[in-house]
Amino acid sequence: MGGKLHWGVDSFARADTPWGNKTLYDFVVHNCKGRRPEFWGRYIGGIDKKPKTGVQNGFLTTEEIAFLKARGCRILCIYTGLRTSVTKDDKQGRADAADACRVAQKVLRIDPHGTWIYADIEPDYPKVQGAWMQGWMEQIHASPFGGAGGFYAPTGNPGFNSIFCPVFKAEGEGNPPKIPDVRRRVNLYALSPSGKERCPVDPMAVAYTPDKPACHADGVVIWQYATGCLETSAWSVDMDLATERGFQSMWDPVEKYRGAPTSPNRASTLVDGVRDGAGSSVGTHGEAAPEVFTDAGDPASN
């Protein structure tokens, strides 16, 4: 696929989880040739998500937001815990979308304008109902959040696509359509790791080849191409690529965070060697000079 690509990760654990006197974020940078993720996928909330024993995790917090903001890192917003919900009707889809918007805007103070929220639909979830998807899309579309939302889903699974495509097409039909310009308003985050190289040392040495539903191939704007990377007893991360459209659908706390005052001299402020905001020293694909570490081993040894 042509065009600029952006590299990032997603994780169940918080980006600021301690690693010795550093963090999971630093661990990722250290193990990826000094490359800094341009975005980090995190759960903003959910209904029935169970915490993992022994892992510092949980939903995105205002403290973690400030941490990622200081590093010029966008946040990919995912709403989870939908195993039971997705088997229900459009009313439940609307209720879930409304809760996602409430948590994002009221609890985390996320600026909704231009920010997409992706509903987490895991491959092992029971059969997803098209009516639920309809409710999710229409409720997000009626909110101040981006477009008609998105789905973090197994786009290579015929079962998912056979449910998604008829609903997606129907939303764009009618006079007027329920969701005008639906192709630009609904995004897909492909949960389909299928690359030959699992967790490559150079994360950008990967062609953008996600599985795409025929009905909305151009809507697959983010691809989770590898899972379970950089695994320790404390965490693992998944690796992602995003098109420019996908990247722009993510929340930019540097520009939009309302939780704390921003320095008027932000462009000239350095935080851990990374320029904050418009003066970012992060490169086209999040490249930066490698961090200096005294020990590359397990977090406990640092």
Image (cartoon, rainbow, N blue to C red):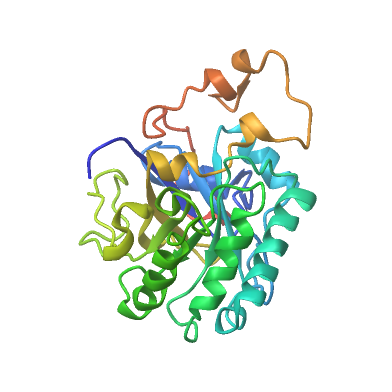
Where is 43 relative to 269, above or below?
below
Q: x and y percent of residue 185 in the render?
A: 48, 50
Residue at point 29%, 44% (across, down): 202
Q: x and y percent of residue 298 in the render?
A: 50, 56
Front residue (pair 153, 288): 153
> Dividing the picture into quarters, in which one does residue 223 lie?
bottom left
Identity of the residue furthest to the front in this view: 175
Q: Is residue 290 left or right of residue 259?
A: left
Q: Which quadrant is home to the N terminus?
A: top left
Front residue (pair 51, 253): 253
Q: x and y percent of residue 52 in the render?
A: 62, 73
Q: Is residue 155 left or right of residue 2?
A: right
Where is 3 relative to 296, above or below?
above
> Dividing the picture into quarters, in which one does residue 68 lie?
top right
Q: Is residue 43 in view from this perspective? A: no
Q: x and y percent of residue 225 in the render?
A: 33, 58
> Dividing the picture into quarters, in which one does residue 98 lie?
bottom right
Front residue (pair 178, 89): 178
Residue at point 65%, 64% (across, down): 97
